[in-house]
Amino acid sequence: MNRAAILSYLTYLNPWRGSRLETYILQTCVAMFASALMVVSALILLINYVEISRSVAARADLGGLEVLVMLFQRSPSAILILLPFAFLFGSLFAFVNLNRRSELIAMRAAGVSAWRFVLPATVSAFAFGILTIGVLNPVASHLQDVYERKVVAAEAFAPTDPAEAIYLRQGDSDRQVVIRADGQASAQIGHLRGVTFWIFTTDRRGAPSFIERVDAREAILRPGSWQLKDAREYTLDKPAQFYNVLTLSSNLDPQKAFKRYASTQSVPFWRLPGLIRQNQISGFSTTSYELKLHQLLSTPLMFAAMTALGAVFSLRLMRLGGLTILVTSGVSLGFVIFFVNQLFASMGKADVIPAALAGWSPAVLAMLGAMTLLVYTEDG
């Protein structure tokens, strides 16, 4: 596809293609968004390169090319976290440039409302937020998952203390299984030794009732089942039964169940609802996944709010002075919003506030603040 075809396609996507003013503002803002994104990405790549180089310095089997591959696998997730700053800075730079070239003065003199030339930048940021949720997040999550498997594979559920026991849990609404194993897992993920299974049934109120216990010398987790070797089964009303090989059903993911440092960043948006339901049925906590889901759903609103904030702090006319102070205030407010976002996320993970409130509050507060400042700037 040549450049003319790309420009034609982008022009078709522009809802203001019939208006030269909105189209010009949109093109200016998109160019500045791209520039700010490149700067943020370069900083993240540099920081991650230093950190990865330091962490793998002792491994002689990794070459420079493999370090670069790991760098590009890890960085996209961090870039997505800092994308709101790219829209804040991009909006600031775009409208400051329009102001310095006296183009904002000409627009205001022609009677153009601030709402009219802020809207294209905000809508484009909102649309990019939808693209981030549906496309960029799954890609970044997949790369993050590949990176975590590569780095953490040797540490897969291996306790630092050999005497420390390993505990797992699985189940559904009718059956719960608690699994304990010795702190000696083999190098192969899903291979446990000295395993004990406590099996319970649950009634309608969720109260557990013990039914049997199974001890095994080894247990290997396969997709959909546990394969037990040299197993003894103990029930309340029958003598112990010995099995050379015994198979128990399982709903655990062999690749996920043994990751000691599982990260929500490696779970794509489209898998979050199903994973939340599965964990709820199994009796696991779903707070971190619910928080991640609501944060992703609020991403378009957050992008739009940061863009509007950047525009509001750049609308003061150059001849009136004080523009530098306003721009600095806008950047500082962006960092305050980022801090508030992290604060609400921490409270959500600790179950101090609901996950939905923790995920949506920063974006809603940022948008309300931007709209309040814009109304004050436009109408006094």
Image: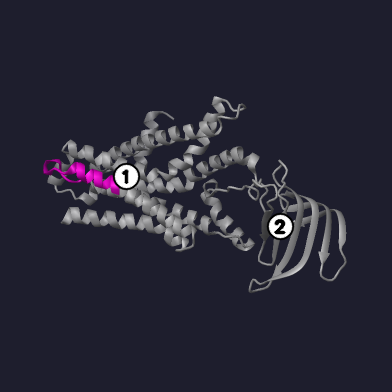
The quadrant of the picture occupied by the N terminus is top left
Picture quadrant of residue 33? top left
Instruction: Judge left or right: residue 222 versus residue 355.
Output: right
Quick check: can you spot residue 335? yes
Q: Residue at x 37, y 51 (%)?
A: 339
The disc labelled 1 sits on which kind of residue? Leu
Quick check: can you spot residue 120? no
Instruction: Judge left or right: residue 152 versus residue 296.
Output: right
Image x and y of residue 69, in percent: 54, 31
SS class, disc 1: helix
Q: Is residue 274 above or below residue 17?
A: below
The quadrant of the picture occupied by the C terminus is bottom left
Query: Magenta region: which residues?
Result: 315-332
Colour scheme in the image? one colour
Residue topped by disc 1: 88
Picture quadrant of residue 286? bottom right
Q: Which one is earlier in the sequence, the residue at label 2 or at label 1?
A: 1
Image x and y of residue 275, in percent: 58, 55
Magenta-highlighted stretch: main secondary structure? helix
Q: Residue at x 69, y 44 (%)?
A: 189
Q: What's the CA distance linking mark 2 and mark 1?
A: 49 Å
The front one of 40 and 161 is 161
Residue topped by disc 2: 179
The disc labelled 2 sits on which kind of residue? Ile
